[in-house]
Image (cartoon, grey):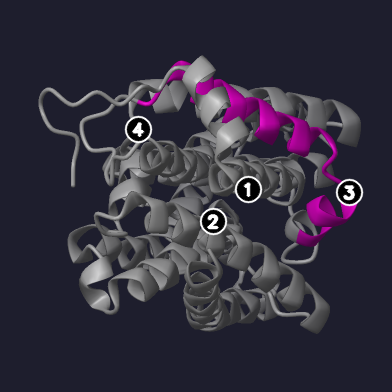
Amino acid sequence: MSVKKGDSLDVSFAHFMGQVLTSPPLALTTLLTLGVIFVNGWTDAPNAIATCVTTRCMRVKPAIVMSALLNFLGVLVMTKINASVASTISNMVDFGGNTEAALVALCAALFSIVVYSVGASVFGIPTSESHSLIAGLTGAAIAIQGGLDGVNGEEWIKVIYGLVMSLLFGFAIGWLVCKLVTIVFAEADRRKTDGFFRYAQIFGAAAMSFMHGAQDGQKFIGVLFLGVAFCGGQSSVEGVVIPVWLMMLCSITMGIGTSVGGEPIIKSVGMDMVKLEKYQGFAADLASSVCLLIMTELGIPVSTTHTKTSAIMGVGAVKRLSAINFGVVKDMMLTWVFTFPGCGLISFAMAKLFMFLF
């Protein structure tokens, strides 16, 4: 069921708080969603500033503060301008017309993401929260609908596009930008260009942080908005405008999560894959930002970490292919192999269990 003409879904903050206090499933859904957003800001957002820190353009703490602020603005501004990613996430699955059961299934999907992430961490399996979210929603929708009727193929195909395009576009744009930079500055004084690229890379890291918020923030806004709709008796958010308070809530949560992000994550992305110079770091950040902007405008959900990783590989390939740590590529592929079936199956089982219990 979609929002029909004449129907009204109250999306005011006061009404939302009243629903949270009276609906345990919505309260748990809200808590889990904000928790996942916080962890995303904590673990994924530092990737945006990894190259900037490892090339010594910025110190860790100022870079994290900048990233937290730009993540906040990315969620808020881009969702206001173009909420197509949030729309894709909200419409890629169909939980059916029973909104009470749908809310329980949505809660189960979010719970499964937490379970899978913890389990994967224990066993050392690489994960992607973006892909876990998509797999969790899909598994729960299939459980409640009893088959693939719970999946909207036209929207879900964008996930496949995202997997391929984040890898190919990230690599290609990273290689192209870096190649152009090396050609343009081939005869320039290295000492002078280092100063220029220091500030250029800070700009690139800021842009990357902004686009991380725009891409990842919208995914979770779409989920929480679904929960609000289900609790209000609507099985779809089609045609309903995302309220500003919801954007603010999610963006503030992500910003706080970013502010506690640590150096180990920055090191793993910026240094373990390929040793970067300042101009390479700028090229990687600019390429990632451009790729994420294109994907966001098209409403295609992608992993910001994988996009950045692909861009760094493209930059490294300009010099020589041996500069790339292909073990990181292997981890990326394993993420895809394990996350979709693993988290999807857990979500399916959890949804069945939650619907039986509640």
The residue labelled by disc 4 is 83
**Range of magenta residues:** 242-268
Please tell me how crowded label 2 is: few (under 14), some (14-19), or many (20+) other residues with Cα within 10 Å. Answer: many
Q: What whole-number distance in Å separates the C-alpha atoms at marks 2 and 1?
A: 7 Å
Whether tag 2 and tag 3 are in contact, CB under 8 A, the answer is no
Q: For the point 71% across and 42% down, which residue is it?
A: 38
Which amino acid type is marked by label 4? Ala
- The part of the image, by quadrant, that contains residue 327 is bottom right
Q: Which residue is mark 1?
A: 28
Residues at badges 2 and 1 in contact (C-beta under 8 Å)?
Answer: yes
Q: Mark 2 highlights which residue?
A: 107
Give the mark toward the camera: 2 or 3.
Answer: 2
Quick check: marks 2 and 4 in contact, CB under 8 Å?
Answer: no
Crowding around mark 4 (Cα neighbors within 10 Å: few <14, some 14 to 19, many 20+) is many
Mark 3 or mark 4: name the one nearer the start of the chain: 4
Query: Could you tell me residue 130's position as x and y percent?
Result: 53, 57
